[in-house]
Amino acid sequence: MSVACIAKPGIVGQAGTARLLATCQDRPGIVAAVSGFLYRHGVNITHSDQHSTDPEGGRFFLRQEFYLSGLENCLDELERAFEHEVASEYKMQWRLVPAKRKKRMVILVSRLDHALMDLLWRVGRGEMPADIPMVISNHPDLRAHVESFGVAFHHVHVPEAHDAPRGRGLTLPEERMLEIMDAEGPIDLMVLARYMRILSPAFVKRFPQRIINIHHSFLPAFEGADPYRRAAERGVKLIGATAHYVTGKLDKGPIIEQDVIRVSHRHRLEDLKILGRDIERQVLSRAVRWHLEDRVLVDGNKTIVFA
């Protein structure tokens, strides 16, 4: 029996599009079971991606986009049916995401503005399906730039020497940041757009696979601080940038996107920084967009990116 999706009067602009993301142990019949379920419920699959780490006992990853008229009015019913008819059988970790809903994204930044301004511009132009309720910075320098986009700016001072974790494992500035964010409602994604402070494991734990950082080197090379200077000292011929999810271990989280550019002995340190900032903008914007479009699935400390 199919789910009854009836469009309700007065609801404008129903997209009817959603994304199904699923992960489970690989075995025969998964794609047939999912596709058969959607067919039985009158769903039209518009795009499908899948990946298996090993056809004999590996992990299976699936991303499907589909359309169903009136979906917004029967999403809960469709989710219950999928759990009962498919997900429980294959022991899936899964989620069904309405494509119409924009994710709420908070940006953390210090003084450098290149990655921040790129994200604000792309969201403002409609290139990224996100709303930015606020930007939080440990310096006041970028307030005017942020507010010119109509986005709230909050300055939360973080001492050079980090506060010791408090009772909940959070520093005092982190507690303040959580208070500010909680007052604005749920946050779907946090982006560290060159936020030059280390977040405590307790803070990161509150946003699992929902904090993206841009690191100004091609990880795992030159982890930590001042990678351009260390790259110049080593005379490298390639510099790069890495966007990754943040975990409790510095610069060790699952990598989403990377890119590089060739350099030579003629490039001074400042030249490397200028070239590197352009790569940082591109790498971060791709990673953020893929997350916003539900194209990234995490496999241990790696990612499956259906770009």
Image (tube, rainbow, N blue to C red):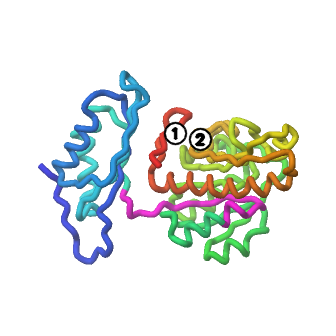
Residue 177 in the magenta stretch? The answer is no
- Image coordinates for residue 143, horizontal then vertical, percent: 73, 71
Which comes sooner in the sequence, label 2 or label 1? 2
Q: In the displayed structure, does residue 169 sit left or right of residue 263?
A: left
Left or right placement of residue 203 versus residue 210 in this view? right
Q: CA distance from mark 2 to mark 1?
A: 6 Å
Dot 2 surroundings within 10 Å: few (below 14), some, or many (20 or more)? many
Q: Is residue 134 above or below residue 274?
A: below
Vertical placement of 8 versus 54: above or below?
A: below
Q: What amino acid type should be assigned to the residue bearing mark 1?
A: Thr
Residue indicated by mark 1: 303
Say whether marks 2 and 1 touch (CB < 8 Å): yes
Q: Which residues are magenta?
A: 98-117
Q: Which type of secondary structure does the marked residue at label 1 adopt?
A: strand
* Residue nearest the viewer, comparing 122 with 211: 122
Q: Position of residue 193 (x, y in %)?
A: 68, 56
Three-letter amino acid code at the position of disc 2: Ile
Say above or below: 141 vs 229.
below
